[in-house]
């Protein structure tokens, strides 16, 4: 058996973001209202209802280079609210489509734990580490949360 250990990674991400339109479109607001109406306006990871932010699964700023057919196929696999399955006959033509949105508490969206310097949000960590926060037992999340030390997390997951 492999003993417990700490994995620390330094990732350099380079992304050329093309010119894009401003945020806060009518489609975005309609999609957010649908999430609220359907009872999905809570954090996908923690079910919290405070300090919520809406994340674009395929990045908003990359709309001009997104192949919407490929996005639709991807969202059939990652379909957190079931909208892709329910709307499978409807093409995606806008990045603000409800199928491309994920409601997250700020800790799981763009947060950094200043205590130990790690990201806890989807914009600040690798996909496998972020997914761990979604699928591990609630009291055994291996990612140091806001204000937690490594020692506290080790105690929690042991």
Image (cartoon, rainbow, N blue to C red):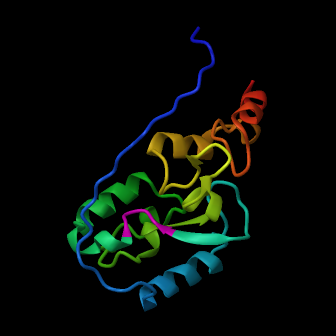
Name the residue rendered at 72%, 34% in the picture: 153
Q: Quadrant of residue 34?
A: bottom right
Q: Residue furthest bottom?
A: 26
How many marks on residues? 0
Residue sitting at 57 percent across and 40 percent down? Answer: 132
| Place of residue 148 in the rendered image (x, y in percent of width and height, measured from the top left) | 73, 44
Quick check: 103 above or below 36?
above
Left or right: 45, with 17 as reference point: right
The residue at the point 41 percent across, 77 percent down is: 96
Q: Nearer the viewer, residue 135 or 19?
A: 19
Q: Residue 45 location in percent, x, y?
A: 63, 54
Relative to 49, 57 lies left or right: left
Q: Main secondary structure of the magenta part?
A: loop
Residue 58 located within the stretch drawn in magenta: yes
Residue 115, compared with residue 55, is above or below; it is above
- Left or right of residue 103, residue 39 in this image: right
Percent coordinates x, y for residue 102 in the rendering = 52, 65
Q: Is residue 158 magenta?
A: no
Comparing 68 with 153, the one in front is 153
Classify 115 as above or below 2: below
Q: Position of residue 69 (x, y in %)?
A: 24, 65
- Residue at the spot x=35%, y=46% of the render? 12
Q: Quadrant of residue 51?
A: bottom right
Q: From the image, which quarter does the C terminus lie in? A: top right
Residue 54 figure quarter: bottom right
Above or below, 55 against 144 in this view is below
Q: Quick one: quadrant of the N terminus?
A: top right
Magenta stretch bounds: 55-59
Q: Is residue 6 left or right of residue 72?
A: right
């Amino acid at each position: 058996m492999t003993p417990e250990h700490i994995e620390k990674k330094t990732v350099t991400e380079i992304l050329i973001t093309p010119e894009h339109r401003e945020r806060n479109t009518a489609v975005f607001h309609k999609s957010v209202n649908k999430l609220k109406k359907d009872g999905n306006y809570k954090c996908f990871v923690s079910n919290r209802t405070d300090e919520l932010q809406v994340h674009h699964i395929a990045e908003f700023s990359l709309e001009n280079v997104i192949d919407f057919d490929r996005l639709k196929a991807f969202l059939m696999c990652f379909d957190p609210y079931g909208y892709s399955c329910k709307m499978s006959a409807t093409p995606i033509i806008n990045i603000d489509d409800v199928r491309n949105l994920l409601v997250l508490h700020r800790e799981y969206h763009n947060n950094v734990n200043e205590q130990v310097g790690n990201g806890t949000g989807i914009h600040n960590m690798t996909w496998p580490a972020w997914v761990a926060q979604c699928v591990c037992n609630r009291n055994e999340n291996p990612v140091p949360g806001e204000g937690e030390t490594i020692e506290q997390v080790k105690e929690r997951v042991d």
